[in-house]
Image (cartoon, rainbow, N blue to C red):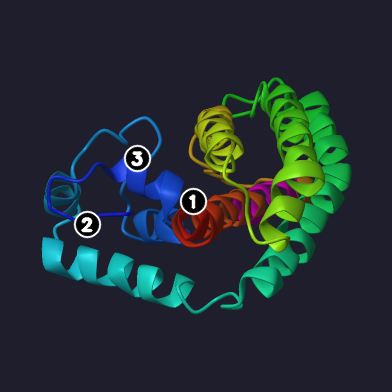
Amino acid sequence: MITLSPDACVGDIADRLPGAAEVFRRHGISFCCGGKSSLVEAANAAHMPVADLTGELQALIDGAATDAPEETGALIDHILTRYHEVHRAEFDWLIPLAQKVETVHGDHDEAPLGITEALIALRDDLASHMAKEEQVLFPMMKNGGHPMITHPIGAMRHEHDTTTDLLRGIEHATYGLHLPEGACRSWTALYAGLAKLSEDVVRHIHLENDVLFPRFE
């Protein structure tokens, strides 16, 4: 579960809590290269009370708990339609757009060099992961579980950690999704799409790790 103690790591929270990255961006808190800072250190650097920062993050946790259906079968269907299908569709246009931005703006000091490669790696990782859930784990859950279900769940949790590492690669390639002054519409659209994708993947992982999987463990 996500904890919001003053010593909690900013980077870990951004990786696990949907919407946290936007909260940190809004307050000028680095969650990419500076993500090892604690919440209290980040709040002090942003000249704000740590209670205010944790309050905003707690509101995200409370909201995430009511974002999806409660019943297990409906929750699985929600994950399939809201996340699996949407991820696949968004990679179809984000990867060509990333290739375009790298090609056209590759000589810019803040060009997101390597973003296409990072996106392809994330796409391939999620494609394999989602297929395993769709073909093995989710049908098992819809049938009421299985004495050995903790093994595929453990494997999915481990793969979620790999996916989180790949998301960090996107953050690094884009300098924390920071748009340079005068960025063209393609560059702007790419970063807006990457921000949504990243938040969706984090929310997807949160629903599985913290809501769905514990029901069978």
Residue 127: which numbered mark, if any? Answer: none
The stretch drawn in magenta includes residue 99: no
Q: Is residue 151 left or right of residue 46?
A: right
Question: Who is closer to the viewer here, 108 or 68?
Answer: 68
Q: Secondary structure at mark 3?
A: helix
Mark 1 or mark 3, which has the lower sequence index?
Answer: 3
At label 1, the amino acid type is Asn
**Cβ atoms at labels 3 and 2 below 8 Å apart:** no
Q: Quadrant of residue 129?
A: top right
Question: Who is closer to the viewer here, 29 or 15?
Answer: 15
Residue with the mark numbered 2 = 4
Q: Quadrant of residue 102?
A: top right
Position above or below: 32 against 74 = above
The stretch drawn in magenta includes residue 193: yes
Q: Nearer the viewer, mark 2 or mark 1?
A: 1
Q: Nearer the viewer, mark 1 or mark 3?
A: 1
Question: Who is closer to the viewer here, 216 or 116?
Answer: 216
Question: Who is closer to the viewer here, 160 or 188?
Answer: 160
Residue in the image at 79% along x and 36% along y: 127
